[in-house]
Amino acid sequence: MSRYYFSLVLIISFFSIQAQEYPLKKGAKIVVAQNSIIVESDQLIELPVEILRSKTERRTKFAMPTIQNIEGLVSTISATNQADQFILTLDPTGLPNGDYTLIIKGSGQFKRYLTSTMISLKVSREPVLMVKND
């Protein structure tokens, strides 16, 4: 009896693992919490960054994403304690007013399987008012 019970538990466990949902049908992509940011020039920004995977890429070992360098912008991506989740830190103190496009892309051996993403950054010396619509 216990042998049959163990087999049944093993089969159910296998199918529950296989039934895990994946947000993409194919490949993997980098996703940022906000794709458009308006910021004062002396304001530090931190944004969550995540790698979303398809089932076919569930075991691929992606390296930490990288962000392009823009003169005057201090930007870093750091790892968190969770797989595929990172923190993007932007310090636009040295940037003049204007609109900028940042590209976050994959790195490492499997970067060709990882779709990049863009962030629109508007830097202003004027105070930025946040309007909340209820």
Image: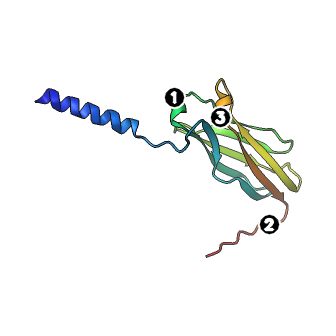
Element under disc 2? loop
Near mark 3 (Cα within 10 A), the count class, few <14, some 14-19 or many ≥20, is many
User: Which of the two marks, 2 or 3, is nearer to us in this view?
Assistant: 3
Residue occupied by mark 3:
114
Question: Position of 7 compared to 1: left or right?
Answer: right
Q: Nearer the viewer, residue 73 or 36?
A: 36
- Residue depicted at x 20% and y 30%: 6
Element under disc 1? loop
Question: Position of 120 compared to 12: left or right?
Answer: right
- The quadrant holding residue 122 is bottom right
Amino acid bearing label 3:
Leu
Q: Nearer the viewer, residue 94 or 101?
A: 101
Q: Nearer the viewer, residue 128 or 132?
A: 132
Amino acid bearing label 1:
Arg
Observer able to see residue 66: yes
Q: Sequence order check: which comes first, mark 1 or mark 3?
A: 1
- Residue depicted at x 28% and y 36%: 12
Residue occupied by mark 1:
59
Residue occupied by mark 2:
127
